[in-house]
Image (tube, coloured by chain):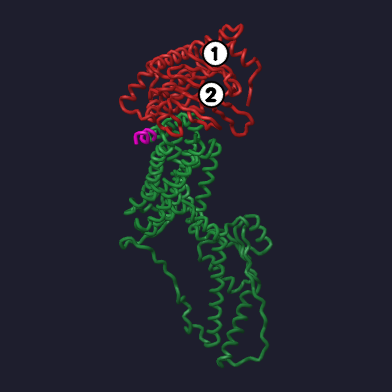
C-alpha cells in the first residue's frame, strides 16, 4: 500500500537529517503507529507522505501512485488530520465541512448526508450549526477528523489526533477510527500516547533521530524486549530517558 | 467550477461573519471621500471668502504703493495690515503669526516715475518729437519689493502670491509708461491717446457632452481619485485573509486537498471584487445624493455609469491581484498589513491622486506610468471629465487587467515553487 524507499529530509539551516534513509512498507488496512520522542521525525514523515514538504532524497508511493505523476489522484486517495485545528473559527461546523467536502468534489445531498452521518457518529449533531470558535478542544479535534474523511480516503494520516482532548472525546475518536479501518481505510498515525497506540495499532515503528529503531506488532515488540511489560517499557528501553527538548 | 463557487461562498461567509471588519471596509472609504472633499471644497471657499491677513510695510507712500494696496484689496484674498517696521514684519512672519509680509522700498514711486520719464524723453527725442536735452542721464538703482513668507507656507500658495504681485508690478510699470507718454504728447490729461484696456484676454473652452458643457468641479476630481484609493486598500484585508489561512492551518489542509491554488485564489477574487464594486456604488451614491445635501457640488454620472463600472471592475481586479501576491509572499499579518497600507499610499502618490503627474519631476513621471493607480485614475478622468468612449479607455483597462494577470500568476508560480514536491 505505502512503499517508502531511502527517504530522507534535511531542513534548510539544519546540519542533521530529520528523516534519514527511511525504508518502510505499510500494508493495506493496517493501523500503523509512528512512535518516537519529540523531534524524532514523526511529523516530518507524515508531512512528506502528504506532499506538504519536499524530500531531500528517496522516494515513496501510495497505492502505486506518486505525487509527481498522479498528484490529483493521490490527493483524492488520502486524508490528513493535521496536528493543529485546520478549521475556520468563524464558520459553523457544518459550513466548514461543506467547504472541505466540496474541495474533494463532493456536493449536494451526497455531501450533506456524509456530513450528518459523521457528525452523528462523533456525537456532534446538535452542534453542527455552532461556530468552531465556540467549541472545546475535543469537539474541534472531532470536526478536524470529519473534515478529512468525508471523501472516504483509502489512506488516512493522523498527526497526534488525540492530543489535548478529554478521555471521552479520545474514546469516541479511537472507536470511530477503528470503524473506518474495518471498512478498509489504512491508518497511519503518530502519537505520544503509548498505551493508546498499544491497543489501537496493528503495527508500530519506533523512530528516533529520523531512523526506525524497531518495528512490528506491539505484542511482538513487548515480547522481544527484556523486562518489558508494555509498549512504554520498550520505548524507554530503546530511546532512553534523556529529555528531548529542542527549539 | 463547483470548487470555485464553494471557495467563493466560503470567502463570503468569512467576510460577513466579521461585521466590524466589513463595516470598516465599506464605511471608512465613505468617511474618507466625504472628509477629503469637504476639506478641499472648504479650502477653496476659504480662499475666496475668508481673507488671509498679510503685513505691508510701506516705505514708499507714493502712487505705486497705493496701487499695490488697491490691487491687494481688490483681489479679495488678502486683508492688508499696515505696519511701520520691516524687522517687526519679518519677525511676525518667520514666527508664523502671518503668512506673508510685503515691503515696498523707499522712493519707489518717484524713482519709477523719473526713470520712465527719462526713458520716454529719450525715445521721443530720437523721433524728433521732443528736443534733446543735453543733460547727463541719471542712473537709477533697480528697486526691490521684498516678500517674507512663513517657512511653513506651501509652495503653491507662495507661487500664486508671487505671480499676483509680479502681475501687479508689471501693470503699474506699463501704466506709468503710458502716463509718461501722455504727459509728453499732450497737456490735456483727459485726452485719450492710448487705449489702456487689455487687448489680449483668455477664455477657457470646456469640453461638451451632447452640447452640454462639462464643468469640472472638486467632486468630479475627488471622487474618482479617492474611490480608486479606497479600492486599492482592499489589498490590506485580502492579504491578511491569505496570511491568516496559513497561520490557522486551513491552508495546510487545502494543500493536501485536490484543489489548485488558482481555484483558492479565484474564490477570493470573486468575493473581493464584489466588495470593490459595492464600495464603488456606495461612493457614487454619496457623490450623487449626499454631497448636494451637505452643500458640495453634485457628482455628475449621467450617461457614464456603464463605463464607470467597467473602469471600477478592472481597477478592482488590479488591486486584488496585488493583494493576492502580497498575501502569498507575506508570512505574518504584521508583514502584510503595514506593507500593504504603505504601498497603496506610494502607488496613490505615484498615480497622481495627490499631486498631478504633470507637475512631478521627469523621473517620477516615468515611474508613474507603471503605477496601476495612474492607469485607473486616467481611465476614470477620461470617463468623468474628458467624455471618452469605451475605445478610448481600452488601453488603460487592458493595462489594469494585465497587471491582475501578472500579479496573480506570480503568486501562483511562487506558491507552486515553494510547495513543490
State whether residue A54 is above or below residue A170. below
Q: Is residue B395 left or right of residue B85?
A: left
**Displayed quadrant of residue A212:** top right
Tag 2 near tag 1, CB within 8 Å = no
Q: Which mark is residue B103?
A: none
Which mark, by number, is residue A23? Answer: 2
Q: Which of the two residues, B313 or B247, is positioned nearer the viewer here?
A: B247
Q: Give the dominant element type of the magenta stretch: helix, strand or loop.
A: helix
Give x and y (percent) for residue B96: 63, 55
Cα distance between the residues tagged 2 and 1: 23 Å
Q: Earlier in the sequence, mark 2 or mark 1?
A: 2
Residue range corresponding to the magenta coloring: B1-7
- The answer to whether residue A238 is above or below residue B359 is above
Which chain appears red?
Answer: A
Chain letter of disc 1?
A: A
Picture quarter containing residue A214? top right
Could you say where residue B356 lies in the image, as x and y percent from the top left?
49, 57
Q: Determine whether A95 is above or below A184 in the image.
A: below
Structural crowding at the residue carrying mark 2, measured as other residues with C-alpha within 10 Å and reported as few (<14), some (14–19) or many (≥20): some
Reply yes or no: does residue B6 show up in magenta: yes
Give the side of residue B64 with respect to residue B273, left or right: right
SS at circle 2: strand
Residue under numbered circle 1: A194
> Residue at point 56% right, 7% down?
A223
Q: Which of A200 and B332 is in front in this view?
A: A200
Helix or strand or loop: what does disc 1 sit on?
Answer: helix
Give the chain of mark 2.
A
- Residue neighbourhood size for the residue with mark 1, other residues' Cα within 10 Å, grouped as few (<14), some (14–19), many (≥20): many
Tell me whether marks 2 and 1 sit on the same chain. Answer: yes
Residue B360 lies, in percent from the top left, at 53, 59
Q: Is residue A176 located in the magenta-colored stretch of the structure?
A: no
- Colour of the chain lettered B: green
Amino acid at each position: 500500500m505505502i512503499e517508502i524507499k531511502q527517504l530522507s529530509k534535511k531542513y534548510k539551516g539544519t546540519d542533521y537529517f530529520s528523516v534519514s534513509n527511511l525504508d518502510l512498507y505499510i500494508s493495506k488496512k493496517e493501523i500503523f503507529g509512528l512512535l518516537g520522542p519529540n523531534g524524532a521525525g514523526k511529523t516530518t514523515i507524515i508531512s512528506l507522505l502528504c506532499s506538504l514538504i519536499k524530500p531531500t532524497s528517496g522516494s515513496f508511493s501510495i497505492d502505486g501512485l506518486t505525487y509527481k505523476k498522479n498528484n490529483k489522484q493521490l490527493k483524492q486517495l488520502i486524508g490528513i488530520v493535521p496536528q493543529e485545528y485546520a478549521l475556520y473559527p468563524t464558520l459553523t461546523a457544518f459550513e466548514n465541512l461543506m467547504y472541505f467536502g466540496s474541495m474533494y468534489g463532493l456536493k449536494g445531498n451526497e455531501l450533506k448526508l456524509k456530513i450528518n452521518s459523521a457528525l452523528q457518529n462523533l456525537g456532534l449533531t446538535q452542534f453542527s450549526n455552532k461556530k468552531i470558535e465556540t467549541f472545546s478542544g475535543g469537539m474541534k479535534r472531532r470536526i478536524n477528523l470529519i473534515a478529512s474523511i468525508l471523501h472516504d480516503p483509502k489512506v488516512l494520516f493522523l498527526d497526534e489526533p488525540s492530543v489535548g482532548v478529554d478521555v471521552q472525546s479520545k474514546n469516541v475518536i479511537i472507536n470511530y477510527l477503528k470503524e473506518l479501518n474495518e471498512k478498509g481505510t489504512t491508518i497511519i498515525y503518530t502519537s505520544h500516547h503509548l498505551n493508546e497506540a498499544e491497543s489501537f495499532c496493528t503495527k508500530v515503528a519506533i523512530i528516533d533521530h529520523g531512523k526506525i529503531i524497531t518495528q512490528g506488532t506491539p505484542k511482538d515488540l513487548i515480547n522481544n524486549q527484556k523486562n518489558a511489560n508494555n509498549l512504554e517499557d520498550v520505548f524507554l528501553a530503546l530511546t532512553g530517558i534523556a529529555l528531548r527538548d529542542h527549539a | 467550477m463547483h470548487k470555485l463557487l464553494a471557495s467563493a461562498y466560503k470567502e463570503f461567509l468569512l467576510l460577513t461573519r466579521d461585521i466590524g471588519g466589513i463595516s470598516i471596509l465599506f464605511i471608512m472609504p465613505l468617511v474618507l471621500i466625504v472628509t477629503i472633499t469637504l476639506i478641499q471644497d472648504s479650502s477653496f471657499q476659504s480662499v475666496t471668502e475668508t481673507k488671509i491677513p498679510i503685513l505691508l510695510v510701506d516705505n514708499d507712500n507714493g502712487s505705486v504703493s497705493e496701487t499695490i494696496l488697491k490691487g491687494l484689496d481688490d483681489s479679495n484674498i488678502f486683508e492688508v495690515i499696515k505696519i511701520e517696521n520691516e524687522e517687526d514684519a519679518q519677525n511676525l512672519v518667520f514666527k508664523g503669526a502671518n503668512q506673508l509680509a510685503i515691503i515696498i522700498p523707499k522712493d519707489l514711486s518717484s524713482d519709477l516715475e523719473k526713470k520712465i520719464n527719462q526713458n520716454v524723453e529719450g525715445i521721443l527725442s530720437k523721433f524728433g518729437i521732443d528736443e534733446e536735452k543735453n543733460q547727463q542721464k541719471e542712473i537709477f538703482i533697480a528697486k526691490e519689493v521684498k516678500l517674507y513668507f512663513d517657512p511653513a507656507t506651501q509652495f503653491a500658495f507662495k507661487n500664486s502670491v508671487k505671480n499676483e504681485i509680479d502681475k501687479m508690478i508689471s501693470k503699474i510699470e506699463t501704466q506709468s509708461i503710458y502716463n509718461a507718454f501722455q504727459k509728453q504728447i499732450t497737456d490735456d490729461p483727459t485726452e485719450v491717446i492710448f487705449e489702456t484696456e487689455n487687448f489680449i484676454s483668455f477664455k477657457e473652452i470646456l469640453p461638451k457632452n451632447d452640447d452640454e458643457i462639462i464643468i469640472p468641479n472638486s467632486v468630479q476630481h475627488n471622487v474618482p481619485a479617492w474611490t480608486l484609493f479606497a479600492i486599492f486598500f482592499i489589498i490590506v484585508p485580502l492579504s491578511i485573509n491569505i496570511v491568516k489561512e496559513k497561520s490557522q492551518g486551513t491552508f495546510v489542509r487545502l494543500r493536501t486537498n485536490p484543489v489548485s491554488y488558482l481555484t483558492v485564489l479565484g474564490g477570493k477574487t470573486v468575493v473581493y471584487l464584489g466588495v470593490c464594486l459595492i464600495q464603488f456604488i456606495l461612493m457614487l451614491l454619496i457623490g450623487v445624493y449626499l454631497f448636494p445635501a451637505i452643500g458640495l457640488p453634485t457628482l455628475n454620472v449621467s450617461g457614464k455609469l456603464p463605463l464607470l463600472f467597467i473602469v471600477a471592475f478592472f481597477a478592482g481586479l488590479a488591486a486584488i491581484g496585488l493583494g493576492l501576491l502580497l498575501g502569498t509572499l507575506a508570512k505574518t499579518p504584521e508583514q502584510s498589513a503595514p506593507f500593504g497600507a504603505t504601498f497603496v499610499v506610494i502607488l496613490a502618490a505615484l498615480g497622481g491622486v495627490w499631486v498631478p503627474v504633470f507637475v512631478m519631476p521627469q523621473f517620477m513621471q516615468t515611474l508613474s506610468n507603471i503605477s496601476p493607480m495612474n492607469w485607473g485614475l486616467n481611465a476614470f478622468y477620461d470617463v468623468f471629465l474628458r467624455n471618452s468612449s469605451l475605445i478610448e479607455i481600452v488601453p488603460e483597462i487592458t493595462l489594469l487587467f494585465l497587471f491582475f494577470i501578472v500579479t496573480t500568476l506570480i503568486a501562483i508560480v511562487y506558491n507552486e515553487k515553494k510547495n513543490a514536491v
